[in-house]
Image (cartoon, rainbow, N blue to C red):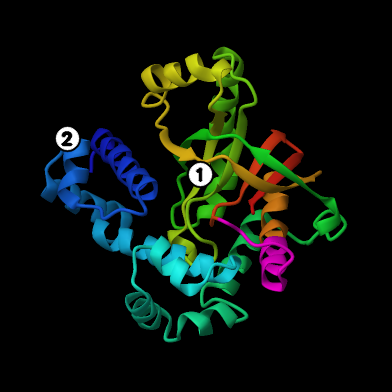
Amino acid sequence: MKTVTQEYWAWKVQLAIAYAHNNSLREINLQTVADMLSVSKDNFSHKFSRLMGEPYARYVKRTRLEAGVGYLRHSNFSITEISEKCQYSNESFSKAIRGWFNTSPTGLRNREYMPAELYTLEQTRIATASQQDFPEHFNMENTVDCRLPACTLYYKILPSGNDPVKGMVVSMARYSRQLRDLIPELAMEDARIITGTLDVVPVTTYDRMMMYVGLLLPHTPANMMAHYRMLTAYQEAYGLVGREIEEGHYKKLKVPLSFADAGLPMYKFINANCRVGHFYMRTNHFFISLPEPSVSEIYIPV
């Protein structure tokens, strides 16, 4: 594809991905998505498959199933509750799990490692040059309970080239700086620059992971004008899509590490503590806030 065409369709694909994540509890119709994007269904289907390596319908189905696996691994929801969250009946959820992982939901919940897990962790270690788990920082005694208000996350999926963590490390400074400059320009209050993955790590195979950087902006009266200006003047110009984040409780862990140094030990910390029941996640999406270049604040939804 020509550069202009590629950029055009990359933006449309990002919008379609955001729509899938924002409507994860609804049936998603391909024609509805194409109409929303003002493109033909056939053209959208072809371009999405070409850019993402799989049809849109398969992407939606896969992410729903992977979300279910994330809940199996890191929450204490029952299998029935998880099935309902991911638009499955108990029977169809069990069948889908067996088809993808050759075991039952209970078997998958009890498995020590996921099929993609060790490879993902090793690739992350290589991409970030991570050599330590920093147990002095990553322990339960250092966590504090907090509550975040309802927010909109304005985010951009980072380029990956099939090596998503390396892509995040390479491109983070550029995109986070753009977003950070918006905070004083739009007089935002309590805004956070955050990063994470849209996918359920490490259920998604490493090459399909999608890392993002975004601006988490609370829904408060002081930020009403900032939200309006983001939507009308900045969102499309900066290539950002939006996601609504409900208010909720979090475990917050502040560590004197960059996001690259904190990422791998963060996942190990979350996984280990969920597995032994020190806390359970109410959603699949933890994230890292970046208040300073050498400081990370980890938020785990509980």
Q: Which amino acid is tagged 2?
A: Ser
Residue 296 place in picture, x, y as percent: 73, 42
Left or right of residue 10: residue 2: left
x 65%, y 25%: residue = 190
- Which of 255/32 is in front? 32
Position of the N terminus by quadrant:
top left
The secondary structure type at the circle numbered 2 is loop
Rendering coords of residue 73 (x, y %): 57, 70
Magenta stretch: includes residue 40: no
Q: Measured from the top left, where is residue 60 in percent x and y?
A: 32, 58
Which residue sits at x=78%, y=62%? 133
State the quadrant of the C terminus: bottom right
* 92 left or right, relative to 169: left
Q: Residues within 10 Å of mark 2 (few under 14, many from 20)?
A: few
Quadrant of the rendered image containing residue 278: bottom right
Write the start and end of the magenta stretch as one range.
268-282
Q: Earlier in the sequence, mark 1 or mark 2?
A: 2
Asked if residue 253 shows in the view, the reply is yes
Labelled disc at residue 212: 1
Disc 1 to disc 2: CB gap under 8 Å: no
Kindly state the secondary structure of the residue where label 1 is placed. Answer: strand
Q: Which residue is mark 2?
A: 38
